């Protein structure tokens, strides 16, 4: 009498205690399914990356003498639905007990609970053994609090896990080196060659084409650049420590027309599929730092560690604390459609052109491109957060809902009314110009407001503040901007609003 264990596509953790030794009584299953490829239009590289990593993971388990059943997307016995695939495998192999790891996505969590309730055999759920925190740790941490400030959680994590602490105090005398992490990159620090894996995935691409799965984005090379195995994930991590950590913090927020990744790690895909864990990442970075202290400043390391034990764990906690209502929130009542150029990159706005083309070419954009270029524009044009979510959930290779949704709907679109961000992340062209060189070669002029060649972000910004006054004017952190708006001459505001409305109504002409 056998046990069947399900492994989802983002649960490829070879170090999980399940796999310590093979057991004749246990069979593992992995399914490539239309239920997962079709709930949103995904980037072609994302679908390819998931399937390639799943196939390799199944092979690695088999090489360790685990029994594995794998359904490829075009296999005849594949029903394309989790419930039907599980039921048929359970029947066929006379399975007596079913086990799974807690999904990180609410939708799948609900589905698996309902499947287990309907099964006539026993079942059990396990931890994925991936994160530092449990699903509900964050809601317990913030119990009774009105605000959910990431910084408080982050400091607690530093103390609890003794990370960058010296005698109970933060190493370097400060918790936060954000101020030194805001440099524009002007080419003075050389960016090393990117580490691109060249995994041949042409067979996966062929299968996806044969299945006629609708995808977006570009993938000319058919060699996959991000890690698809634990070994590759660890190589990417080592490369990050040796080549990129030294300036990670300095240029964390920088943007440049010639540079796709700057000093970013590109580890999110490997981490989100659980090929490597946040503990692997943090411990490796700290070990490297401790043996290279004379070369690497604390500010670089703190800036990086904050992303992993701070933001990443915090976003997951917020997701579990706030779902399922979170997915429906639209606090600013935004209803406009997303511009067509989000799917093509075809716009004269240079910042958006570069960020969107980077996303279409590589399934990647770094944090500030996501937040202050595409996210900023979508919010300023008052786009329906459902449309914004769908785009972000599809376009990035690292996009899985537990981390995409809090970042998009919460942090970037302020649709949760300020639970994650204390004020909306909106700006005029000035911020984009401060952090990058996009404006230098733009069709639009960053200093103009209403002329034909004026930077669209400038009028959109004031129009947004004026339109959303009822929601934002009492926000303490917005007071200064509203006092500037209040001092504006009515005819000037009128002109700005006309210009902004023209942009919103004709987005695809800009
Ligand atoms: P690095 O800059 O090298 O950072 C290191 C790691 O820190 C990342 O790999 C990631 O695991 C973690 N990290 C950094 N910032 C965040 C954050 N805000 N939230 C959670 N983890 C973070 N990240 C995703 O993994 N999946 C998403 O779908 C996703 N959607 C986003 C949508 C929006 C609108 C925004 C503003 C951010 C989003 N992020 C998402 C967070 C962040 O942009 C990416 O994690 C990062 O760009 C991945 O590239 P990297 O690995 O080179 O990151
Ligand atoms: Fe973007 Fe405006 Fe700068 Fe052009 S001028 S790159 S639209 S911020």
Image: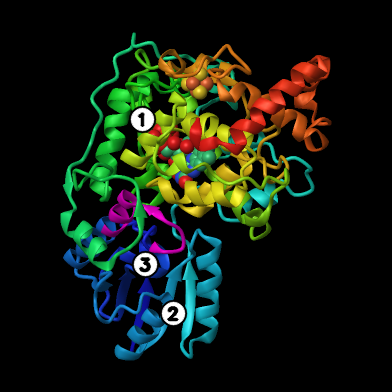
Mark nearer the N terminus (2 vs 1): 2
Mark nearer the N terminus (2 vs 3): 3
In this figure, which residue is indicated by the disc labeled 2? 83
The colour style of the image is rainbow
| Whole-number angstrom distance, CA of label 2 to CA of label 3 | 14 Å
> In the drawing, does residue 20 fall left or right of residue 41?
left
Q: Which of marks 2 and 1 is in front?
A: 2
In this figure, which residue is indicated by the disc labeled 1? 287
Q: Residues within 10 Å of mark 2 (few under 14, many from 20)?
A: some
In this figure, which residue is indicated by the disc labeled 3? 7
Q: Residue 81 carries which label?
A: none
Q: What stretch is highlighted in magenta?
A: 37-51
**76 inside magenta stretch:** no
SS category of the residue bearing label 2:
helix
Whether 90 is drawn above or below 306: the answer is below
Determine the residue positioned at 35% across, 59% down.
Answer: 214
Determine the residue positioned at 28% across, 41% down.
Answer: 234
Q: Residues within 10 Å of mark 1 (few under 14, many from 20)?
A: few
Residue 279 place in picture, x, y as percent: 42, 43
Q: Do the residues labelled 1 and 3 touch (CB within 8 Å)?
A: no
SS category of the residue bearing label 3:
loop
Prevalent SS, magenta region: helix
**Closer to the camera, 32 or 335?**
335
Q: Which of marks 1 and 3 is in front?
A: 3
| Whole-number angstrom distance, CA of label 2 to CA of label 1 | 44 Å
Residue 10 place in picture, x, y as percent: 39, 57
Determine the residue positioned at 30% across, 90% down.
Answer: 92
Determine the residue positioned at 36% across, 61% down.
Answer: 9
**Closer to the camera, 180 or 36?**
36
Whether the residue under disc 1 has CB within 8 Å of ligand 1: no
Whether 296 is drawn above or below 92: the answer is above
């Amino acid at each position: 009498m056998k046990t069947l264990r399900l492994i989802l596509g983002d649960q490829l953790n070879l170090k999980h205690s399940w796999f310590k030794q093979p057991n004749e009584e246990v069979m593992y299953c992995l399914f490539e399914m239309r239920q997962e490829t079709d709930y949103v239009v995904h980037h072609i590289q994302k679908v390819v990356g998931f399937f390639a990593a799943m196939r390799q993971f199944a092979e690695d388990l088999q090489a360790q003498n685990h029994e594995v059943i794998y359904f490829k997307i075009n296999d005849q016995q594949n029903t394309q639905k989790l419930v039907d695939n599980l039921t048929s495998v359970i029947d066929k192999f006379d399975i007596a007990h079913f086990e799974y790891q807690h999904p990180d996505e609410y939708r799948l969590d609900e589905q698996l609970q309902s499947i287990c309730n309907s099964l006539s055999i026993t079942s059990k759920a396990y931890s994925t053994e991936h994160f530092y925190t449990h699903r509900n740790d964050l809601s317990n941490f913030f119990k009774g609090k009105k605000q959910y400030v990431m910084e408080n959680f982050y400091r607690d994590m530093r103390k609890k896990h003794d990370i960058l602490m010296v005698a109970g105090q933060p190493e370097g005398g400060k918790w936060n080196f954000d101020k030194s992490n805001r440099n524009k990159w002007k080419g003075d620090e050389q960016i090393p060659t990117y580490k691109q894996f060249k995994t041949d995935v042409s067979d996966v691409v062929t299968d996806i084409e044969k299945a006629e799965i609708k995808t977006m984005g570009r993938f000319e090379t058919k060699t996959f650049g991000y890690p698809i195995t634990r070994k590759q994930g660890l190589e990417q991590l080592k490369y990050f420590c040796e080549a990129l950590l030294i300036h990670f913090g300095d240029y964390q927020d920088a943007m440049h027309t010639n540079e796709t990744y700057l000093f970013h790690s590109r580890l999110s895909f490997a981490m989100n599929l659980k090929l490597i864990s946040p503990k692997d990442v943090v411990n490796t970075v700290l070990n490297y730092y401790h043996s290279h202290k004379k070369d690497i400043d604390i500010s670089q390391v703190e800036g990086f560690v904050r992303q992993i034990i701070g933001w990443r764990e915090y976003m997951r906690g917020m997701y579990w604390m706030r779902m399922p209502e979170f997915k429906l929130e639209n606090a600013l009542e935004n209803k406009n459609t997303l511009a067509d150029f989000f799917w093509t990159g075809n716009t004269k706005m240079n910042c958006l052109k570069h960020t969107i083309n980077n996303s279409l070419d590589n399934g990647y954009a770094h944090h500030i491109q996501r937040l202050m270029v595409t996210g900023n524009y979508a919010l300023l044009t008052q786009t329906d957060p459902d449309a914004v979510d769908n785009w972000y959930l599809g376009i990035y290779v690292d996009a899985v809902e537990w981390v995409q949704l809090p970042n998009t709907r919460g942090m970037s679109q302020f649709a949760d009314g300020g639970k994650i961000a204390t004020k909306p992340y909106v700006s005029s062209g000035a911020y984009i110009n401060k952090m990058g060189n996009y404006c230098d070669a733009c069709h639009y002029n960053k200093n103009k407001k209403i002329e034909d060649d004026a930077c669209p972000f400038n009028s959109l910004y004031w129009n947004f503040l004026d339109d959303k006054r009822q929601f934002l004017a009492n926000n303490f952190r917005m007071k200064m901007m509203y006092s500037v708006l209040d001092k504006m001459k009515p005819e000037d505001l009128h002109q700005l609003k006309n210009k902004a409305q023209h942009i919103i109504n004709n987005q695809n002409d800009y």
